Amino acid sequence: MTTGRQPLTTLVQGVVQRVRDVDRRRPLLWDAALTGFFVVVALVDAGGGWRNIALNTEVPGWLVLTLSLGFTVPLLWRRRHPVRVLTAMAPVILVSGWTGAMLQAGLIVHIVVFNIALRLPLRTLGWAAALVTVPNVMAAIRYPRGSWEQQIIPSLWTFTLVVLLGVVVRSRKEYTASLVERAHRLEIERDQQARLAAAAERTRIAREMHDIIGHNLSVITGLADGGAYAAAKSPERAAQALDAIASTSRQALTELRRLLDVLREESPGTADPGAAGPDRAPQPALTDVDRLVEGVRAAGLPVRLTVLGAPDGLPAGRQLAAYRVIQEALTNTLKHAGPAATATVDIGYGDGVTVTVTDTGHGGPPRAQGRGLTGMRERTALYDGTLDAGPLPQPPGGWRVHLHIPKDPTP
């Protein structure tokens, strides 16, 4: 049960955070306010309070006032030039110890020591320690009072504790800065990874749509040309071509709809629980090559298919890659090989899958290194496979695509 009151630690942290914000926005204002506070305190002590702990109460008042200002006014530059401030305070510290005034304002020097430990190399603290110790040694020699330990050890302990405090604060600030820098780097790396993943996904989508649309449109084009040729002499053959065009079109639409449904992003909690999800039918595999070949034959390209073995244990991703390579090779044959061409598809299973697609290719323009061949190489590279594609020697000529995808990834 909460009472609505904030814990004391929360209140303290809030006050400290507000002070830090003011210090960050207006550092000079904060330094001036802190310096003014110590000037006032030192002047109040110079009014007579300093005699309570002085080793020599006969020090002139004007000298006490001067020493008090010498201890406090340089604090205005303690953060920007701590070494110079400590150097400026050095004669004031020595005079205070030599005269026996031993002003309490001399403790302000530890604020400068703290800033040195916080911002500068620690080797700078060596002469600072000597500067703090020498006045006490002089005072102990000129005005002996009690043992040496009572006059010197307390100042050394104070110096040590201030240095340790500065080192701790410095280490914490550096650790926090390193965490912030690491978080910034991780954020940059996350954005870079997201951009790389988006680019890879766009490439994959482009490859899939190229294979789906390119192949089916090539088949539809072949069927339409054959139907137009047969329309005048054999209306039945023309009707069969139209039926095949419709079937191929529906198949292409189904594959595209499946691809787009999977890519569609649904926000968590906004999707209708009762709505049907996207079609999760599996992607084509090597067992579907028979149907692929039948569609190509219906488009007018004679294809001979030979299969040795079975794709047992071959991962689905590797089967899809091999299927798409066969599909793209037959599509290129439909588009470029000419009207009298024939094709051969040989599939063998062993340590993975090996596919060879050849055609006679006596007609048609030379085949350019287009997007289709690039897509085949990209698919093959995903699974550490090898792909060779190029023309066969004349005669008889033609084109050959040879693919090998291992069953397991290369170590």
Image (cartoon, rainbow, N blue to C red):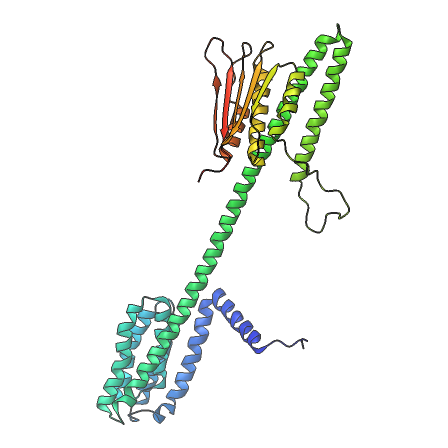
Q: Where's residue 277, x and y in %?
A: 72, 42
For the view shown, which residue lies furthest in the front direction? 309
Q: Is residue 355 above or below residue 1?
A: above
Q: Where's residue 77, x and y in %?
A: 37, 70
The residue at the point 70 percent across, 40 percent down is: 278
The residue at the point 33 percent across, 72 percent down is: 85
For the view shown, which residue lies furthest in the left direction? 141
In the foreground, 390 or 287: 287
Q: Is residue 78 visible?
A: no
Query: What quarter of the picture does the N terminus occupy?
Result: bottom right
The residue at the point 44 percent across, 79 percent down is: 37
Query: What quarter of the picture does the C terminus occupy?
Result: top left
Q: Is residue 55 above or below residue 304?
A: below
For the view shown, which residue lies furthest in the top direction? 233
| Quarter holding residue 31 | bottom left
Would residue 318 appear left or right of 123 to someone viewing this image?
right
The residue at the point 51 percent across, 67 percent down is: 21
Would residue 108 appear left or right of 123 to someone viewing this image?
right
* Number of numbered discs overlaid on the protein picture: 0
Would residue 37 appear left or right of 157 to someone viewing this image?
right
Q: Is residue 111 above or below residue 204?
A: below
| Quarter holding residue 333 | top right
In the foreground, 315 or 73: 315
In the foreground, 263 or 51: 263
Q: Where's residue 380, x and y in %?
A: 51, 31
Q: Where's residue 299, x and y in %?
A: 66, 16
| Quarter holding residue 158 | bottom left
Q: Is residue 220 visible?
A: yes
In the foreground, 158 or 391: 391
